[in-house]
Amino acid sequence: MSYYECMAMSPIPIRQQTRAVVRSLLAQTAMQLFAQKGFDETTVDEVAAAAGVSRRTLFNYFRTKEDLALSGLSEQGEVIATRLTDRPADEDVWVSLRHAFEVLDEIEASPENRLEIVSMLFDNESLRAGHAEKQARWTNLLAPLIEPKLPASEARSFEARAIVGAAITCLQAATEEWLRLRGSTPLFDLYDTAVAAIHASN
Amino acid sequence: MSYYECMAMSPIPIRQQTRAVVRSLLAQTAMQLFAQKGFDETTVDEVAAAAGVSRRTLFNYFRTKEDLALSGLSEQGEVIATRLTDRPADEDVWVSLRHAFEVLDEIEASPENRLEIVSMLFDNESLRAGHAEKQARWTNLLAPLIEPKLPASEARSFEARAIVGAAITCLQAATEEWLRLRGSTPLFDLYDTAVAAIHASN
DNA sequence: GAAGCTATTTGCACTTAGTGCACGAATGTG
DNA sequence: CACATTCGTGCACTAAGTGCAAATAGCTTC
């Protein structure tokens, strides 16, 4: 078998892996600068220079400047998704989602950094918007996974999207409140309050 | 009293009004072009030319190109807010919100145009993001209005934000589904399905 | 009507994000 | 060594958005 035939067959060749490493390194460098100088005050050229690559190369790894700051969110979404598939099939949807979300507490960096990063995400308008969009993508990822848990219905996939969307909204609201309280209350205490609030029928 | 003293006192002078009219006209022109050629394929210069103003003037009325397409959403949010204040104080929060949202059916343009506009909003990534962000702003607008309806609690304002956020998410999910069905099912039937889904306890 | 104040418009130069293209370097293959 | 392919890079280009200063139009006062 020739090299290129092999390359065409193997789904995860070495090249892909090194690419992933470089990508992660670039994002890390960028986040450091963003945290230090602020997102708007940091130019892509500065990030490229700090990482020791050309501006053009940076755009080979990340579609936009926003992606440099938000690529972590996509990964988080995927981790949540895999965690969600591990939950028992007959578990309540909201309980499953809550457990899946909890990986965020395990994944995320040190608590101080976390506050810093979240602050940055909410300070900048386009980042807030991108953040909201990324969470909408989570819905696409997670909804199919909880759909089998719902009672049969013609609109089941739509219902699944509504539920996941609402859960993510609770997580979002909890994160905002957590930020406002500067981390003094555990994120998931706030999340539980939010979920209880939308379930209470006045 | 001199003219300028008068100008300084009157809170809504003629100038402000004409400015609002021009703004609306500009947005209208832009939306026409966006619907015709697509958002990304239309440059700000083209919009300015079509409206008969300079590029620079356009940016005096709208902070960004996105705002040209999304300014309508802010207005909608305000209309929903005023409608919400008209609801009886002892009405259930979800019922009040549902009634307030219903103004969208009255406000929006002709049904065909509506599909066209919503399609445009969801086709483009940055517009989707902006859309999500604008809806987050609705939360800031609406949450204080329903807060008094909630039972007393130390976290009441936070709970209000979670509820409003969830309701908006249902509206968002319903709109997506409505778009997918190309308008064949009334938007608020879908909205009710979504709300019922997040309230059902498996 | 003349003079004057003010908000608005506009042109111009500038920064930054992002893209298309083509060339050269690195890497692994036969 | 000759090779294919991917990757990094430079360059030129488009488009969004900003700051500044000059021009202009609307209205008032004299």
Image (cartoon, coloured by chain):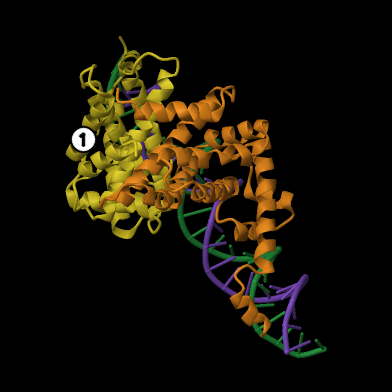
Chain colours: A orange, B yellow, C purple, D green
Give coordinates of residue B161: x percent, y percent.
Answer: 40, 27
From what the image shows, is residue B16 above or below residue B22?
above
Q: Is residue A182 left or right of residue B28?
A: right
Q: Chain of mark 1?
A: B
The answer to whether residue A29 shows anywhere in this view is yes
Secondary structure category for the residue under label 1: loop
Asked if residue B142 lies left or right of residue D13, the reply is left
Query: Quarter holding the N terminus of chain B?
Result: top left
Local crowd size for mark 1, using a 10 Å CA cut-off: few (<14), some (14–19), many (≥20): some
Amino acid type shown at disc 1: Glu
* Image vertical order of residue C2 relative to residue A26, above or below: above
Residue placed farthest to the top in the image?
B1
Q: Nearer the viewer, residue A123 or A114?
A: A114
In this view, the residue in front, B49 or A132, is A132
Asked whether the viewer can see residue B72, the reply is: no
- Report the residue marked by disc 1: B102
In the image, residue B198 above or below residue A72: above
Residue occupying the point 69% across, 57% down: A21
Q: Position of residue A87 (x, y in %)?
A: 49, 46
- Image coordinates for residue A9, horizontal then vertical, percent: 59, 76
Q: Residue at x 26, y 41 (%)?
A: B191
Residue A41 coordinates in the image, percent (x, y) = 62, 39
- Where the C terminus of chain B falls, by quadrant? top left
User: Which sits in the foreground, B14 or A165?
Assistant: A165
Q: How many marks?
A: 1
The residue drawn where x is 69% and y is 41% is A32
Find residue B3 and report its image quarter. top left
Q: Is residue C5 left or right of residue B102?
A: right
